[in-house]
Amino acid sequence: MSRDYAFDVVIVGAGLVGASFALLLKRKVPNVRILVLESNKSIPSSKIAVADSDIRGIALSRDSKNILKTAGIWAALEKSAAPIESIHVSDKGHPGTARLNRSPDDEDPLGYVVEGRWLSNSLNENMTQKKIQIWYSTEITDTLIEKDQVRLTTSKNNTVIVAKLLVVADGVYSKIASQLGFWVKSKDLGQKAIVASVTLDRKHRGIAYERFTQSGVLALLPLPTSMGQSKVSLVWTQPSEFALQLEQATDVLFLDELQAQFGYRSGIFIDVSARTSFALTTSFAEEMIRARVVLLGNVAHSLHPVAGQGLNLSLRDATGLAEAIASASNANKDFGSVCVLDKYRKDRLFEQHLIAEFTGNLPALFSSQNIVLKLGRNLGLCSLDLIPILREKFLNFGINGKVL
Ligand SMILES: Cc1cc2nc3c(=O)[nH]c(=O)nc-3n(C[C@H](O)[C@H](O)[C@H](O)COP(=O)(O)OP(=O)(O)OC[C@H]3O[C@@H](n4cnc5c(N)ncnc54)[C@H](O)[C@@H]3O)c2cc1C
């Protein structure tokens, strides 16, 4: 016999976005009853277990730092984060380079870099501290959307749950969104992002590099010093076949190719960690909400990692959604209603489109053989360095993820 459990909000997916949203919502509406369902067995919670997991260097904007502060995890996370003091953007084989530096009056650095594993660890530890219920190894097997609630059957002994709102945050290949028939427009880019940490022969001085090449984009992000060694986090996008060769290459061959593509602007690469890779898909949900259901994180929009904006954008969405729920609940309104959710959608849509367009167009522009475009993009980078107003706009995008 199965038993019904009642919650206010059920979040599917305890990834970076689902977990951040759970904490933000708990902060804004302390008495809210939240349940998080996660298909993974468990997410590492001890620092030993965490050592082998997600080594992606995630660049966080100033906004994101403040959001993570509100979520209550920044104080613990800060020691695992490296400040970005300067951003250098260049194009292999062409002279244009844009340099964006922290100004002496700036209280904060341009942003921070933290490895996914430490962020995930802090989020999960904090959910446990806040007594947010998480059911691991659990998926939804059936969903019924009723007038006042959503009824979910789970794989955990067929337990049935009812909730006022279902937040779908189960990632880019969302089972739930497709079961419910949400229309998500997606594109397989035929590329992979190779991720590793690389040891330098000198200090990185907080410089984040982004280098565009014919076949892909290369980013080197500063990491906190580890056992006296200066390390950077590498994200290197390449066509899938070549990416596989790079992933399987010996460390020496890998570092040789990296040095050839990147040059010596950050010094000599002396060591590389084990590599992992991510197949790149961009997607955008044409439908983001329905009565009692909202899509959040990668299921709502998955961006090319070129400008490091996916999580930054989703954290601002998560804040907007938590605020919408808080104000509806303070006004005794039904926060799962179309009316409340549609207002949230409209508030977020412009920025979501803008950033998806901006990050979606950059790689195409930089891999184009078209001479006019090539000229234009070099002029673009040079002028970025030379014309303060353009620099301002680009800098604002890098720091706050806002183009305007
Ligand atoms: C190489 C790379 C570098 C990046 N760098 C940056 C950066 O510098 N800055 C930035 O802002 N963004 C960056 N991003 C983007 C960022 O990583 C994503 O935006 C973010 O991780 C999305 O998180 P998510 O929680 O939506 O999805 P996911 O991380 O995919 O989490 C989904 C969760 O749902 C669970 N799940 C899946 N299916 C089910 C199911 N059926 N039931 C229950 N649970 C389920 C999964 O196990 C997982 O825990 C980068 C991305 C890549 C690939």
Image (spheres, grey):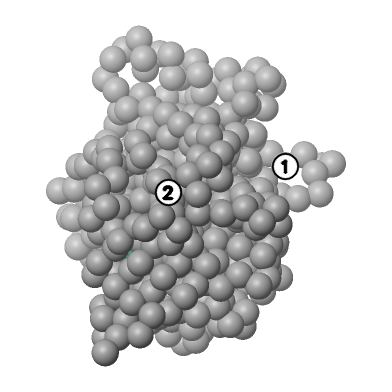
Residue at the disc numbered 1: 102
Residue 345, image x and y in percent?
Answer: 50, 40
The answer to whether residue 297 is above or below residue 373 is below
Quarter occupied by the N terminus = bottom left
- Which residue ends up furthest to the top in the rendered image? 372
Disc 2 on helix, strand or loop? loop
Which residue type does callout 2 highlight? Ala
The answer to whether residue 145 is above or below residue 119 is above
Residue 274: name its quadrant. bottom left
Q: Quadrant of ligand 1?
A: bottom left
**Residue closest to the eye, 232 or 396:** 396
Residue 328, image x and y in percent?
Answer: 64, 52
* Chain-order first, disc 1 or disc 2: 1
Give the residue at x 23% y 55%. 179
Image position of 222 (left or right of 95): right
Residue 270, image x and y in percent?
Answer: 42, 63
Image position of 400 (left or right of 255): right
Residue 134, image x and y in percent?
Answer: 45, 79
Q: Is mark 2 within 8 Å of ligand 1?
A: no
Residue 389: name its quadrant. top right
Residue at the disc numbered 2: 291
Q: Residues within 10 Å of mark 1 (few under 14, many from 20)?
A: some
